[in-house]
Amino acid sequence: MKRTRNRKQSLSSRRAGPRRKGAAIILAVFLLGVLVSMLALAIDIGYIAASKAEARRTTDAAALAGCWQIFESSVNNAGDTLSAEQAIEAANNIAALNYVCNGSPTVTSLGQDADISLGYLDSLDENAPLLTSSSNPYRAVRVRLRKTEEMNGQVPLFFARIFGQTGRNLTVESTAAMASQVRGFNTPSGGSDAIDILPFAIDIQTWNNMLAGGGTDSYEYDASSGEVRNGSDGIREVNLYPQGTGSPGNRGTVDIGDANNSTSDIARQIVYGISPADFAALGKPLMLDSSGTITLNGDTGISAGVKDELASIIGQTRIIPVFSSVSGNGNNAQFTIVQWVGIRVLAVKLTGSMNSKYLRVQPAPVVVRNSIPGDMSRTWSHSIFSPVVLVK
């Protein structure tokens, strides 16, 4: 009896063994199918992510190129229409050089549905709308790249074709901007860094008169060679010296740093700019306050002792302060500064009779790091820009 029961158990064990092995194979096949499906899904998702990264790289580069071109066009004195055309062309060219999904993308620049848009921002918020009013403080270029059935083709899918999906739409957008209103300057971070500000101020009446068509046009700047020569380039000029400031013994020189700046200090600032040590000696932020002013102490005036330093920067750009009023005499003069303006040094002569002396400059675009952007409440600056940054 016991032997019979053992035989039955042995037969039962032999029958159960093959059934368990068959179930494992079925489960393995099922799991393999799941793993293959997940791998296929991962490959398609990974390709979409890689394509989006390529598209983002393309729009970032195109927006940056377009925004920098706006500055370059202003250096070459291009009008608004030509400047816009050159910015669009620069953005388009860079976009075409960046491959997305193994192909060179196309971005449209015409019509209401254009992919390249130029305008202004009221802030650097990534959701700020692109505006048309030039009163806003930031110049901006926005570039969009579309991969749809109608434009550049969809991002192709591989394994999802099993389920009838051949591609996925993709749209990426980037915005680059630079501040065109600057209210002041932060202290440079490096000990050897400086900000190219000349310690010579000009009165706002003379500056505005020049912008309105006054002054002269006797010099031209060749951007390709960096040289200044006699001739006309359509940009008016103004003489920083001699000028009457209403302050006896002072012709517009200001102390940006120690109140007892010597001729050697001024000479250094002309060539190398305002240093971190000068910022520290000034003892206050080099920035227009909420009322739009800052007071700078005066010096005794531009002297022949710095003529060589001024001659060495002919053709270069600098920043100068603009004042609305001045009180006191000589070293005790107090200048009320109301704007910062970008200029190019054209010619200098500080010897001879008073009437024959001059320091001629013209408005010129300047890019300055460590700048503090202004808002829309007033005109803080003219021809001064911050470096281009990606907003979105």
Image (tube, rainbow, N blue to C red):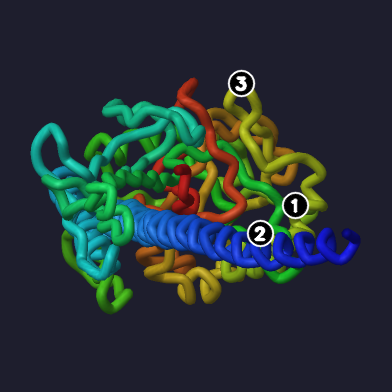
Residue at (33% x, 31% y) in the render: 130
Dot 2 falls on a residue whose secondary structure is loop
Find residue 111 and name its label.
Answer: none
Q: Which residue is mark 3?
A: 291
Q: Is residue 18 above or below residue 312?
A: above
Packing grade of label 1 (10 A; few <14, some 14-19, many >=20) is many
Q: Earlier in the sequence, mark 2 or mark 1?
A: 2
Residue at (55% x, 51% y) in the render: 200
Displayed quadrant of residue 10: bottom right
Dot 3 falls on a residue whose secondary structure is loop
Extreme-right residue of the structure? 2
* Type of amino acid at the residue the image marks with label 3: Ser
* Type of amino acid at the residue the image marks with label 1: Phe
Find residue 279 and name its label.
Answer: 1
Q: Which residue is mark 2?
A: 274
Task: For marks 2 and 1, give the CA distance.
Answer: 7 Å
